[in-house]
Image (cartoon, grey):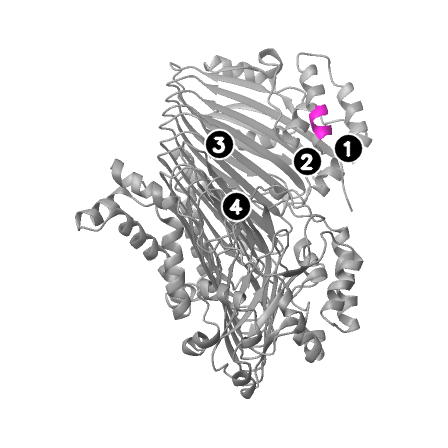
Amino acid sequence: MKSALKIDALREAVARMPNDRLSDARLAALQHLDDQGTPTTRHEDWKYTNLASVIDLSNQWLADGAESAPPGSDSATIDAVTSRFDANWLIIANGKVDLDSIALAQEAGIGVALLSDSIATFDFDAPLADLNIALLHDGLCLRIEAESELSKPIGILFIDNATAAVGVTQARVEIELAAHSEASFIEYHASSGTASHYANTVVNLDLGDNARVSYVRIQDRHHAHSQTNRLGVHLGRDSRFSHCAFDLGGKLIRNDLNIQVTGPGASASFHGLYLAGDGQHIDNHTRIDHRVGPARSRQEYRGILSEYSRCVWNGKVIVHAGADGTDAEQTNHNLLLSENAEIDAKPELEIYADDVKCAHGTTIGTLDEAALFYLRTRGLDAQEGRQLLTRAFAQIIVNMTPITAMQETISGIVADRLANLIDGVE
Amino acid sequence: MSTSSEKLESLVNRRYEHGFVTDIETDTMPPGLNKDVIRAISARKKEPEFMLKWRLRAYRYWLTMQEPTWSHVRYTPVDYDSISYYAAPKSDKDGPKSLDEVDPKLLETYEKLGIPLHERARLAGVAVDAVFDSVSVATTFKEKLSEAGVIFCPFSEAVRDHPELIRKYLGSVVPQRDNFFAALNSAVFSDGSFVYIPKGVRCPMELSTYFRINAANTGQFERTLIIADEGSYVSYLEGCTAPMRDENQLHAAVVELIALKDAQIKYSTVQNWYPGDENGKGGIYNFVTKRGDCRGANSKISWTQVETGSAITWKYPSCILRGDNSVGEFYSVAVVNNYQQADTGTKMIHIGRNTRSTIVSKGISAGHAQNTYRGLVRVMPQATGARNHTQCDSLLIGKDCGAHTFPYMEIRNPSAKIEHEATTSKISADQLFYCRQRGISEEDAVNMIVNGFCKEVFKELPMEFAVEAQALLNVSLEGAVG
């Protein structure tokens, strides 16, 4: 069965959107999406992830009148997340920006505004990013100045409350860091309700010369909810980007992390952990374009798969002609705990310059029987042994979380999720 | 430094040494492809009816297929109507009964190529089947092989003499509709080699085929089928050259290997088709489908390839590890210089229990060339205890070349152990400086480093090929570092 987005219904939905400064962009994005079409598994980048379920959901939502739930309908979940991590929280609930949270952030000295008040032009580069603009109510625009002294990280909470009806939401955040500025961000995806839901989010991050960013993304959506998420990063001269992502929940999850190295001396480290259980499909695509050198990039992704789950990891390093002095490494390790789990790993290198150092390594396997046996001789039962070994495997990523204050809490969340996953493994 | 780079410059410009044309009359079909051409090829080969039907079915599939575009190479499209699908040396028309009847000019060609045919064959102890343009010209050592029960003959002969084996195995590893080029080959293949090793026989000598495209505007579509029956062993070598021509020529071959229970096949290739000139003009398009099927338990198929020629290479010798405990190996050195492009690698499909595979790929890029490793390791849910180790390294020589790695791992069994590692680097100034300091010329130092880089693969090659491969590598890269 071939699923395609019903473009006429989409056009009607776009026509019903408010007439504001984003109107032209929405129409342009719609046109671009119409020209390109939505990706299918025949596209190399989508070989292992079939968007049919998400597209069907979107079509159904369009047919139902394209209504989304009102914002602020789930304050309990919002409180739970925002109290867990100390940050200045900006909230996008059900695709709509929470204006109170903007006011609070502004009081704390953060340069933040509505997207519609800030910019009206966008780059159109990927079909899902087009869909994002076409149906975007509004988004956030942040600018971090060199002298801003932020005592706490900036939290961005994407939360969707899927009530009785099928829901589709779009959210977008544009962040600019001035030269010599520094900031930490927490990107948190949560959802509640049991109806089918699809969230499509885009975050763009532009690092000026010598800017420093610590970035932590946590995705802990409901098991009935799907998400596509795109983080685009531009690195200026001598800038530094440290990123860590945790995928814990969700049904069909696709994350695209695209990094453009455009300034010499830049460095990027981006790591991730994905934990998948029954029926989950988690796809992480990373791509780093080294356009100039010297520059350094490091990435390590780890995954633990149990029950009927499937994960995809596709890391791509492109060293463009002239990007001499590039030093890039990518690593991916996977633990398969179930007969029914599948991992599709694809570490890619595309190199057009000769003065480079690039390497990648991938491993796939299950828990070491000898290690499990050793733990049993020390009095741990099989379940405790598995728990210990999987935690140790995951902890390596947790320890790389660039906002160190978060490590302990994340470690706890990961342990809880692992306990869930391992329950039932024999 | 400037004198040395001048010297290097002159070495880079060295011409392809197998680029001569043998001036003999050929029997060539007019260009273009249709059912009549296929009927004519089949008739000229005196093939039985089933073979013609098989070809026509492949042709029908081919008409519905699209030329693949996913590979990481760029080339001017092939005009399938301007190619002649059959060219044979005229003298072959009456069918040479022995080497003495073969056109001396042809033998001279092989002399120039340094193939151990005729007397030299006996010395080297290698049985050679030489395919010139489209037909097999001579097969040496036939009698000695038949004593052991080994069948080694031109494909067209096998179709006539052993139709039961052909019917049973042809297309059983690479079906007609497998891909665009395999379908084309299935429709028009002209000749190639056929090998059958009976139960429990260790083939007394190494078998070898030499391919050469001589005539202009022809394509070469050979087909090789090797069947190793239970408990047998065979080592097979394949080499190829072509004259220098400004136009691109197409080579679309299919190789099928079948290893039954406890059988082993070792397939080695030294591919040295004309790579085009230093501006990327001319050269062979080498679009080849090679696949081995480890059908029985404990069987083993090992591919070793040294790829130095061809303008475009598109080739993935693969192993289907169907039998329990079967083993697949792939050792490859791919060297590209000037404007050559190679997209090559392997596929290891683990189906049986406790199947193991090893992939070692060494890519070297120089000049403006692009070298891609593309490999798939797939572990099916029933393949308990599967094991794979993949190592692919790239060496870059020069600012304008590229080295790319696209490994695919699709793992669906938790007991699998899969490791993949890859590195990309250039010959470091430190290494060169150290060698220079010890009195080794820059040229020799580069050769030494490159040979060391490729050692793991060369040691898998049979002796006489290893020497040739090493020499080829040195020629291909001479002057690449300045």
- What type of secondary structure mainly makes up the magenta span? helix
Q: Which mark is residue A61?
A: 1
| Residue annotated with mark 4 | A274
| Residue annotated with mark 2 | A198
Check whether the beta carbons of the residues at disc 1 and disc 2 lie within 8 A of each other.
yes
Specify the amino acid type for callout 3.
Ile
| Residue annotated with mark 3 | A259
- First-in-chain label (4 vs 1): 1
Check whether the beta carbons of the residues at disc 4 and disc 3 lie within 8 A of each other.
no
- Separation of marks 4 and 1 at Cα, in angstroms: 29 Å
What's the chain of the residue with tag 3? A
Q: Is residue B69 above or below residue B362?
A: above
- First-in-chain label (1 vs 2): 1
Residue B285: where, in percent of width, then height? 58, 50
Q: Is residue B148 left or right of residue B64?
A: left
Q: Quadrant of residue A291?
A: top left
Q: Quadrant of residue B230?
A: bottom right
- Separation of marks 2 and 3 at Cα, in angstroms: 25 Å
User: Does the image show residue B394?
Assistant: yes
